[in-house]
Structures are given as structure tokens and as C-alpha cells.
Amino acid sequence: MSFRTKLFYIFLFYGLLLAVVAELFMVKINKDVVRKDSLKKAALYAEALREDFQQNINNARAKLEALRQSKILRENFEKNRVTEYSKELFLDIARTSPNIMQLRFINLDGDEAIRINRISLHQEAYIQKKSHLQNKAKRYYFKDILRLKDGEFWYSKVDLNVEHGKIQIPIHPVFRIGTPYYYKGKKEGVLILNIFMQSFLDSLVRSDIYSIYLLDHENYILVDSAHKNEWSRYLVNKESSPQLSLKHLEKLGAYKLDLKIGNKEGLKVLIIPRKKYIVTQVEDNFYQFFWVVFAVVLLSFPLAYLMSIVPSKLNSKVNELNEKLTEEANKKTLLLSLFDLSDAVLFKWNCDEKWSVSYVSNSVEKLLGYTPEDFIHNRVAYLHCIYHDDLERVEEELKSAIVSKSYFLTHKPYRIVTKDRKIKWILVHTVIIRNELDEVINFVGYLNDITQMKQKEFALENLARVDQLTQINNRLYLDEVLMSQYYRFNRYAEESTLILIDIDYFKSVNDEYGHIVGDKILIEFAEILKRSIRKDDILGRWGGEEFLIILPHTDIERGSILAEKLRKIIETHSFKIVGKKSASFGVSTFVVGMSVEQCVDMADQALYKAKKAGRNIVKRAEIKASIKKK
């Protein structure tokens, strides 16, 4: 066998050996990378779950706060009695959210004065009969809430509903929020809101790639993705209920996050990436590595042949090749493991006017639609991808960090514009790199897409201000607008007029056709008003069959004209099922020396006069001379 042939087989053997070793090495690294990446994603997923949980509680608290601030409830206490109007107010609030199970007012003696019930999720809420009302003086939550100060809230544990001393079957997981009710500085009782939690908790633990557990402070399972052993500490003996070993699960790659929802229960969510998900990720990457190794094997034959021809050049060729392979392997291994297997993007840009990019990870194409070459070759600048309304703030945050000698900066979330002109929200962590003279030379930014999270946030904010039946503004939002207009009137003398509208004889619709038809009439009525007002006018449901329109930059004369126009439109409209209906209108305007409550009350008095005069009439408020004079 010739020396040349020996060299050929030697080089071929080492080429094949290198390919096999590289494959085994890459498989080991790939498993570690997938596990670490799944844990990072689990951490982000857990934060999103915590925000969803908190938003659900905040939405319920907002309902209770609206009731606590209600003018109708205050008027009832002023008259020292609970009227049907108060019960209807409680019922209207319960109808705005299908997850409200119970809404109650309990007096200082522990007697339920008002109780709104809903048997199950999405069923119609109803007012509990007086004969079924109970005394709750001995219940722990009644005593706990009575100890609170005005404006403070109490939160219960997430547990199962109990009726007459026994767990309700089928089970109803509930969460309770309570607050004391004060009238003129005097405590009069407590307000309590019970929330159905089953549907929300099921959605909380639903995932295709994670096993999710909601645990209490003793690590008992409340709910989980597999729906096994749920609520076991309540449904079976506590001693035989399974507890999870968090230390053992965390060693296996589980992520734990405390929810911290304010009830001191110690709720936590445990997220475990499913084995099937990790195996699938590893297998997908394995096939990619396999084709790389296969290509190396094929190249080993001609390479061994060529190297056997020129053995004198072998050393220099091998060294040169090793340097290139080592440099490329280090760069690709680092960036691939951190970014190319995730949705995050790594940017490195220079400290110049255009923020020219010196490096960007391949994942940028998924986020922005541009390739890394577009940035590297200056076909597009990252500075131009930042949404124009956010650009000045982002630049100011970076300048402040440079002036304060910071080396790390987390921007407030801002918007970017993709290649196809879509707008996304991102969270950016930036490292500021300086040279030996402490001069800033470039920046390294770590970008995360949080668009879905922001969309959920905006959706929850919209839910808090929209009436769920009519899809127009609710009472809470109208109160905010009234205060804003009142401020602008007193600060800038900006006129604002109110129109309070009540559907005539609406109770007869509910009595004759039922509440479902009544709800349809309310929806159709709201659509008529929405189509008939100006773009800048604010329309909302004031309560029951009452609607309020706020007219900025409008005096009472023009407001009365609009009210008359609306009255005629409604009078001539034929509603589905019930046919013709009419409405009465009360119009008032802000006047110097008049509070928001007085302005609304003047509109309400005008509405009352319209009803008394025969209905289907517009009445303008009579502004007292003493108020005008002020």
C-alpha cells in the first residue's frame, strides 16, 4: 500500500470520526439548549398567567368599587331604606359580567339586605327573594370585612362554594372580594362579590406544551392541566391528599412563580415543559445536525484525496480550517443557543446618528420581516423601525442612561414597525458597551415580542369601560368623562351639556315579552343613539334603561336641539317584536358653582318632568339663579 493511499485512509478515518464525535457533541448541547430555552419560555408564560389572574381580580374589584360609589345607593341610605332601585342597580352590575356568582349587601347585624344570585356561569342573574335571605353575622368573611377602613378591600382564598355548611355539588370554585360600605363617614354594612372561577382556572392551566399546576401555600393541587387530584384537600381527607414536592420538580426543570394576588393565600403556579414538547424540539434539531454531518462525510472523500496529494500543505490547511471552524462554531453556537431557537432578537448597533447595525441574529426576520443582511448592509436602519410616536422617548431613555454612566438599561415597552407595516410591541434590554476610556462605542440590545401580552392588556382595559350588553360605554367610564369635562369647564371655560334619556314604559316590555326581548330593545336603542350623535359626543349606559350623552363644546340650546332630533328618530323607529317605542329626555349643562352631581341631578329632574308631562318629551333643566350668579 503506497504512502499516498495510507494518507488517504488516515484522513478519511479521521474525517468520519470527526463527523461522529461532532454529531454526539451537538446532540448533547442541543438537549441542554432546548431544556434551558423551554424554562425561559415557561418563565415568560408564568408572568403572563399572573397578569391574567390579576386582571381578572381587578375587573371584579372595579365592579364592587362602582357599587360603593353609586349615587343610587347613597340616596337610599339618605332615605334610610333599601328600595327596588338599589336591587335593580345590583342586578344591572351582575349582568355586566357573566362570571359574577353572587353580589350582596349585608347590614351591620349580619342580615343580607340585598342578594343577587346566578346559579351557574352565563345563566341569568336574579334577585333573591326576601324569604331566602340569610344572616351572616358569624361568617369569618363578614367579621374580617367589618374590620376594614373605608376604601379597603378584602380578598378570600380560591376555594369551593359552600351552601348550608356543605360543599356545593357539582363544585363551584369561587373567589370573593369584599369592602365595608360607609355613608357620611359611618359604616353601614359590607359589600361582597363572589366570582365563578372554574372557567377562568380551566383556561389558566390549558396548554399544549406545558403541564400547569395551581397550588396553595401547602402545595396541594387546586387545578392542573390533567385535571387529576383537583381540589382534593376539600373533597377527600387532607391526610390522604397528594402534595407536590417543589424541590424535586424544580430539579427536573419545573418553573415556579408566586401569584401574589393580595389574599395572603400563597397561591403559586408551577409550569413543567412536557416531555413530548422537549423530545420534538430535540428531534427537529437532530435532523438538521444529521444533514450537516452527512455533508461532512461526503466531503471527507474528496478532501482526503486532495490532502493525500499535497501532504506538504496539510498542516497549514488544517490550521487555517480549524481557526475558521472554531470561530464560526463559537459564534453560531452562542447565538443559536440564545436566540435562533427562540423568538428573541439580538441587536448590536454602533453609537452613531443612524444607529448602524454591526450584528443582528437570524430571528430578526421573524420579528421585523427584514433579513440580517438588510441591516448589516445598511439597507434599513433599526432607528427607522421604531414607531415615530415612541422614537423620542426611546432616544431620551438611552441618553439618560449614558449620562448616568449606566451599563444596563431596560426600556419601557415601545412599538416597532415591521417590513409589511404592521405594528408590534417589544420589551428591550440594552447593554451599553464602553472602551478603556469609558467612551460609549456600541450597544447590545435583547428584544422580546410582547404584542400578544399588550393586546390582552388593551382588551381588559376596554372590557372595564364597555357595557357588556349594549357594547357602549358603561357607568364607570361615564363617571371618568364627567369628571374630565367638569375639570375642563372650570379650568378652560369649555362648555359641556348632558342629555339623560329613559325609554318610556320599558318595564312593560320586560313584563309582556320577557327580559331577553328587553335586552334586545336596549341593544337596538343604543345602536340608534350611536348612529345619530356626533363623532366627539360620548354615549353610555347610565343604568337599566337609562342612557347618558355627554356633549363637549356644546351649550344647552344646541344640546336641546340634538335631544329633540333623537326623540323624533326614536318615535318614528319600529323596534323588532315590540314595534313603536318612545323616550323621554332631560337636558342640563355645566354652570359655574355647580358640581358634577348637581349637573347630573338637574338632568334627572328635567327627565322626571318630561315623564310627568306625559313622556316622549324633551325637558331642559331650570338653572337656579343663585348658581348662575356665582
Image: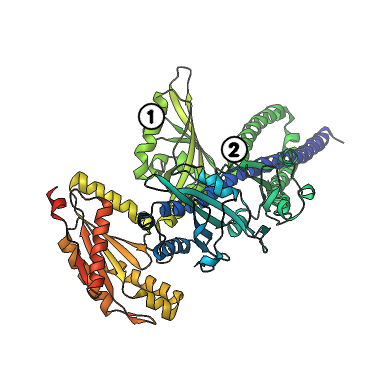
What is the spatial separation of the Cα atoms under label 2 and label 1, in whole angstroms?
Answer: 28 Å
Closer to us: 371 or 474: 474
The percent coordinates of residue 268 (x first, y second) are 63, 44
Q: Residue at x 69, y 47 (%)?
A: 272
Residue 452 in the figure: left or right of residue 6: left
Q: Residue at x 21, y 69 (%)?
A: 618
Q: Give the class, few, some or many, for how many residues have Cα within 10 Å of label 1's Cα (few <14, many ≥20).
A: few
Residue 84 in the figure: left or right of residue 581: right
Residue type marked 2: Leu
Where residue 522 sits, quadrant-wise, is: bottom left
Indicate the quadrant containing the N terminus: top left, top right, bottom left or bottom right: top right
Mark 1 secondary-structure assignment: helix
Q: Is residue 156 visible?
A: no
The percent coordinates of residue 517 (x first, y second) are 43, 77
In this view, the mark in front (2 or 1): 1
Q: Residue at x 46, y 29 (%)?
A: 442
Closer to us: 344 or 160: 160
Vertical relation: 91 (above or below) 36? below
List the residue tagged with mark 1. Answer: 399
Mark 2 secondary-structure assignment: helix
The percent coordinates of residue 259 (x first, y second) are 59, 43
